[in-house]
Image (spheres, rainbow, N blue to C red):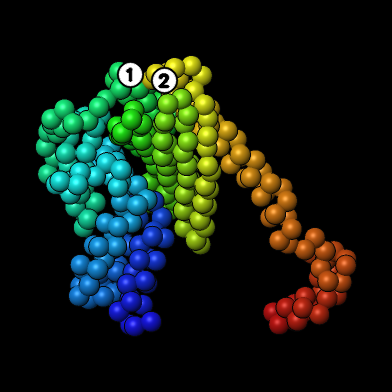
């Protein structure tokens, strides 16, 4: 592999592994390391990663390959009828303008009701930053993207809940991802990925769709909590030895001097 291809892969790997909300910092550090000579490469990998993985900007704008406008290279907010772009360097939304599809996009009759229900769903279940978008497709299909995140760099943690669903007729299919990064006096990362499928209870409507989303996301939350409990009750306990290799507990009181290590410590005072 050539040195150029190796550099491309290293940059791509570092960008794709960036924790939620920390992508701009990763890009800044890469530009510093590369002396600003590979800015176009860094920006290319940033854009590719954002489009593929789905991101949230300025707390309310969803960016993904699913809502990119091929004619302008901007992104479409079908909910608020806006076109916008993003500044990769600052992570801010820029060049916002009105969007007019000219009648080329077919919105289902329940579109406004679905938007209203998703707004309420966010208020009920996401106490921090929350954004969503609904993207009409061919033959009545819909892409629904939900992102909730909490960025608390002052206390050394970030987290993001991300879900992407496809609705076709009365079947909801999607992926739920959770990414948490805790980095005070260490570096701990939790990744959760769940495939979800659910049939609507009745004809497609704002209520039936959001109820199906609520059901699969509640089940995913229960599964995450079960995994946490298993990690705490079993896995973490198995990481440490209950008894030392001598098969007897150490007396940490005055008798510590009876052990060679304890004796060395006591006599060295």
Q: Which residue is mark 1?
A: 110
Q: Is residue 142 above or below residue 17?
A: above
The image quadrant where one finds the N terminus is: bottom left
Please give the name of the residue rendered at 35% of the width and 22% of the height, measured from the top-left corner. Answer: 114
- Mark 2 is surrounded, within 10 Å at the Cα level, by few (under 14), some (14 to 19) or many (20 or more) other residues, namely some
Q: Position of residue 53 (x, y in %)?
A: 37, 50
Give the vertical position of 224 relative to 244 (above or below): above
Nearer-the-camera pick, 242 or 10: 10
Dot 1: element: loop
Kindly indicate whether the residue at mark 1 contacts the one at mark 2 (C-beta within 8 angstroms). Answer: yes
Q: Residues within 10 Å of mark 1 (few under 14, many from 20)?
A: few
At 87% from the left edge and 71% from the top edge, which residue is drawn? 246
Q: Is residue 247 above or below residue 150?
A: below
Instruction: Using the rendered image of the protein, determine whether residue 214 is visible from the camera's viewpoint.
Output: no
Name the residue located 47 percent from the left edge and 31 percent from the top edge. Answer: 172
Q: Report the front residue among 54 and 224.
A: 54
Which label belongs to residue 204?
A: 2
Measuring from the top left, give residue 204's x and y in whole percent.
41, 20
**The residue tagged with tag 2: helix, strand or loop?**
loop
Near-viewer residue (241 or 249): 241
Image-based side of 252 in relation to 170, left or right: right
Question: What's the distance in space between the residues labelled 2 and 1, CA to CA?
Answer: 8 Å
Q: Going by the image, does 70 lie left or right of 240?
A: left
Q: Point out residue 167 in the picture as x, y percentages from the top left corner.
A: 41, 31
Q: Position of residue 144 (x, y in %)?
A: 37, 34
């Amino acid at each position: 592999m050539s040195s150029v291809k190796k550099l491309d892969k290293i940059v791509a790997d570092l960008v794709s592994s960036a924790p939620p909300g920390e992508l701009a910092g990763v890009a800044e550090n890469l530009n510093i390391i590369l002396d600003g000579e590979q800015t176009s490469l860094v920006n290319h990998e940033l854009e590719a990663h954002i489009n593929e993985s789905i991101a949230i900007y300025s707390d309310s704008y969803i960016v993904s390959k699913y809502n990119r406008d091929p004619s302008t290279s901007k992104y479409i907010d079908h909910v608020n009828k806006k076109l916008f772009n993003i500044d990769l360097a600052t992570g801010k939304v820029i060049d916002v303008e009105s969007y007019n599809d000219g009648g080329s996009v077919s919105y289902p009759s329940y579109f406004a009701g679905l938007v209203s229900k998703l707004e309420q769903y966010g208020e009920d279940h996401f106490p921090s930053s929350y954004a969503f978008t609904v993207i009409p497709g061919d033959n009545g299909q819909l892409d629904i993207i939900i992102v909730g995140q909490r960025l608390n760099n002052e206390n050394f943690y970030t987290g993001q809940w991300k879900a992407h669903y496809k609705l076709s007729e009365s079947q909801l299919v999607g992926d739920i991802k959770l990414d948490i990064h805790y980095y005070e006096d260490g570096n701990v990362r939790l990744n959760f990925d769940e495939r979800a499928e659910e049939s609507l209870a009745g004809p497609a409507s704002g209520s039936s769709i959001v109820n199906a989303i609520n059901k699969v996301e509640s089940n995913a939350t229960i599964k995450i909590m079960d995994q946490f409990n298993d990690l705490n009750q079993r896995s973490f306990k198995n990481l440490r030895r209950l008894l030392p290799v001598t098969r007897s507990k150490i007396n940490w009181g005055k008798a510590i001097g009876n052990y060679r290590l304890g004796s060395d410590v006591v006599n060295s005072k």
